[in-house]
Image (tube, rainbow, N blue to C red):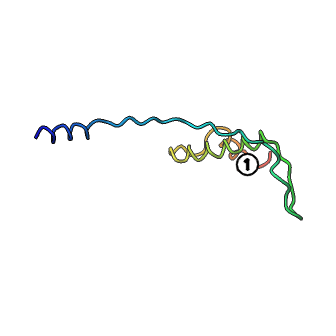
Amino acid sequence: MKKMMSKAKEAEKKKVVVVASKKTGGGVKGSKGKAGAGASVKVVDKRLKSDKRGQKVAAKRAQKAGRGKQGAQKRIQKKGKKGGR
């Protein structure tokens, strides 16, 4: 009986697990290679791209929250619908 109880207590004890993060190499940030033959390459502003991506995410989030389009995007769309003055 005593042995059974001690075994049950042993099972209840949490086993200590050590978690360590491994440092990996940084790598070299080089060019992404050349485009394929006959491909048209367009050089764009990195900041503009990230801004566009951010707007896309914001719009998606707003739609999920049921707010629709907001802020500058809403104004831009309204301008387009009014027509040229």
Q: Which residue is mark 1?
A: 80
The extreme left residue here reads 1
Q: Whole-percent x and y of residue 75? A: 68, 41
The extreme front residue here reads 3
Q: Nearer the viewer, residue 40 or 33?
A: 33
Q: Is residue 28 left or right of residue 3?
A: right
Decide: few, some or many residues near mark 1? Use Cα within 10 Å; few <14, some 14-19, many ≥20: few
Q: Amino acid at mark 1?
A: Gly
Task: Give SS at disc 1.
Answer: helix
Q: Nearer the viewer, residue 6 or 57?
A: 6
Residue in the picture at 86% in, 48% down = 43
Q: Whole-percent x and y of residue 25? A: 69, 39
Q: How many marks?
A: 1
Q: Whole-percent x and y of residue 64? A: 52, 47
Residue in the picture at 72% in, 48% down = 82
Q: In the rendered view of the protein, which quadrant contains the N terminus?
A: top left
The extreme right residue here reads 38
Hey, which quadrant is residue 11 in on the image? Answer: top left
